[in-house]
Amino acid sequence: MKKFSNIKALTFDLFGTILDLGGSLTPFIAQFLKSKGSEVSPEGFWGQWRGRQRIEQYQDTIMMLGHSGYLETARRGFVYTLRLNGVEASDEEVEHFMRAWQELSPFPEVLPALERLKSRYKLVILSNGNPHFLDYLAENRVRWDFDDIISVELAGAFKPHPGVYRRAARELGLEVSECLMVSANSFDVMGARACGYSAAFVNRYGLPYEDTPYLPDVTVTDFTELVDALLI
């Protein structure tokens, strides 16, 4: 019996898993910092920003003041990281810079992998992103016709809130055990596994996994390895 024979849908994280955030945004960061006369490393700035955005998302969910949305937490994280590095910017400059998020591109091996996977599984985006933004990215940047695109806004909380994974399974008309989460973010894999999903950790960045009993069913470095693992 094949290991994943019960799986009917692959739910993909988008940001950092399908889309290359660092590779897409670092050139814009470099240009912005240069315009400000800052000598901060664009790569270092991105690392700080990415980490801060996750804190903003966790705070957003824990405080329960109303779901702010992905792009708003990204903006807050950007403003915080600017202040952390002593870089001054007006609200208008921040708003203009945030348009860089419209230019995200997928990792090069993603589309060939999706082409191979589509005959066996339903392929679904399950993302922290705003619904309209996810639609734009899928159509114009990834350029793939997914079977469904599910935003965490349905649950009103960011991943890894359990309501996100359970609501997604319900939207798909599936049991959680029939879904497999694919993510480059270990907290996402952990959250899905804790809810009864199977999960694949796409460890693109060579990072350690969480100290938790909720381990991935498979760990790979990219989507080419993912296909090999899921189609055995």
Image (cartoon, rainbow, N blue to C red):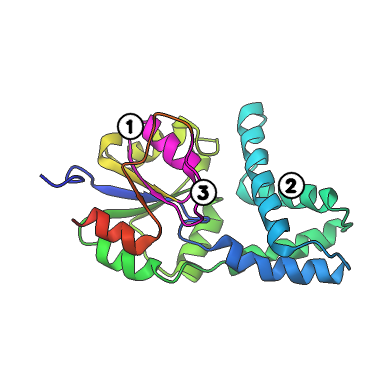
Q: Residue at x 50, y 69 (%)?
A: 141
Instruction: Answer whether residue 108 is magenta in the image.
Output: no
Q: How far apart are marks 1 and 2 (CA)?
A: 32 Å
| Above or below, 192 relative to 100 | above
What span is colored magenta in the figure?
A: 184-210
Going by the image, does 206 lie left or right of 95?
A: left
Say few, some or many: other residues with alpha carbon within 10 Å of mark 3 (under 14 / 14 to 19 / 20 or more): few
Q: Distance between the residues labelled 1 and 3?
A: 23 Å
Which circle marks residue 196 in the picture? 1
Q: Where is residue 7 in the image (x, y as percent from the top left)?
A: 23, 45
**Three-letter code for the amino acid on which mark 2 is drawn:** Arg
The residue indicated by pointer 3 is: 207
Mark closer to the chain start, 1 or 3: 1
Q: Position of residue 101 (x, y in %)?
A: 63, 63
- Contact check, label 1 and label 3, Cβ < 8 Å: no
Q: Where is residue 81 in the image (x, y as percent from the top left)?
A: 77, 50
Q: Residue at x 49, y 59 (%)?
A: 135
Question: Tag 1, which secondary structure?
Answer: loop
Going by the image, does 77 lie left or right of 139?
A: right
Q: In which quarter of the image is the C terminus?
A: bottom left
Could you say which quadrant of the image residue 177 lies in?
A: top left
Say few, some or many: other residues with alpha carbon within 10 Å of mark 2 (under 14 / 14 to 19 / 20 or more): some
Instruction: Answer whether residue 199 is magenta in the image.
Output: yes
Mark closer to the chain start, 1 or 2: 2
- Contact check, label 3 and label 2, Cβ < 8 Å: no
